[in-house]
Amino acid sequence: MAKLDPISITSETHGLAGNFVLPDDATPERPVPGAVVLGGPGPLPLQRYTSDGARNWPVTWSEAFGNAGLAGLCFDQRGSGLSSGLYHEADWEDLYDDARAAAELLGVQPEVGRTAAIAWADGANFALRLAAEGKVDALILLAPGFLTAEERYARQMSTLAARKGLSDRVVQIRVNQWRAEMQEIVKRVEQGETTAVTTVGDEQVTTNLVRFLQSSIFDPAPIAGRVTVPALILHGADDGVIPPAESEQLAHTLAGPVERRVYPGEAHFLYRSQRAMQEAITWMQSTLK
């Protein structure tokens, strides 16, 4: 069995609260591979526990890794759970700095050898950058994207138009409307407005507009071409948010060795899949031994 210990990452402005999971037999003389679970720059922060105290997927994955003889680290993104700071005030670079600090902390643990970053959906963008900067030795990416937000929206509109028999002109009108909406946000930011309240599910969320724009224009391709570490890409065949074709494009762009697996019957929330988790563990054990 593995032991779960609290761990903290501090900076000048905030502190990140996390869990460090380590198998009982790990020692500085016999270090084990470890993985850090990353949140992304999305509208909602990734935290270890839900509001009613249930374990969120970073904890279940970290514990499963620990019980399999690996180390795991997960943390509440700033302004959520037990971490201090304000999530809605953080831009893309701020949240990436937190991810990098977590990866670096895992890497200096004396009982931990080579490390991997685990990320889902838009969190994969942080993981790719960590790998390109030499902060981790491997990647496990769940449902990662490859297109910019505009490219994905345009393809979604084209698919919808083809299904309904609509013309390319209708698609272009919708894309132009999307661009106009983005330009309105750019103007609001230029005028000093940095946050906005939006609805995510049933929840009112304060969104950082600067981070939203940064995420919308982020293009994974240039960074992916500089990633030479081994990568495992897992995707649900029925993912309607990020189509599996995107992770296939990413796999072809990464410069290092890549294994990609697609799961029939699985959709976007692939971190719920026990099979995906177990295959990630097996891959870690063989790749970073």
Image (tube, grey):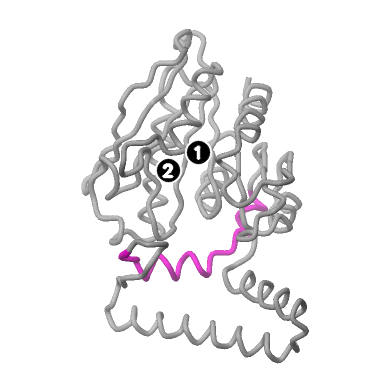
Looking at the rendering, which quadrant does residue 48 occupy?
A: top left
Q: Position of residue 230 (x, y in %)?
A: 67, 36
- Circle 1 residue: 135
Vertical order, 155 against 48 (above or below)? below
Q: Residue at x 37, y 36 (%)?
A: 54
Secondary structure beneath disc 1?
Answer: loop
Q: Residue at x 26, y 42 (%)?
A: 83
- Viewer-closest of 207 and 271: 271
Q: Position of residue 245 (x, y in %)?
A: 74, 58
- Viewer-closest of 116 and 51: 51
Q: Tell me whether circle 2 and circle 1 mark residues in contact (CB < 8 Å).
A: yes
The CA span between labels 2 and 1 is: 7 Å
Q: Earlier in the sequence, mark 2 or mark 1?
A: 2
Number of other residues with Cα within 10 Å of mark 2, as a class: few under 14, some 14 to 19, many 20 or more? many
Q: Which mark is residue 153?
A: none
Q: Residue at x 35, y 38 (%)?
A: 49
Mark 2 belongs to which amino acid? Arg
Q: Which residues are magenta?
A: 204-226
Mark 1 belongs to which amino acid? Lys
Number of other residues with Cα within 10 Å of mark 1, as a class: few under 14, some 14 to 19, many 20 or more? some
Q: Name the magenta segment's main secondary structure.
A: helix
Q: Is 208 on the left or on the right of 153, as rendered?
A: left
- Viewer-closest of 91 and 181: 181
Q: Is residue 213 magenta?
A: yes
Q: Position of residue 197 (x, y in %)?
A: 31, 71
Tally of numbered tags: 2
Q: Which mark is residue 100?
A: 2
Q: Position of residue 41 (x, y in %)?
A: 43, 56
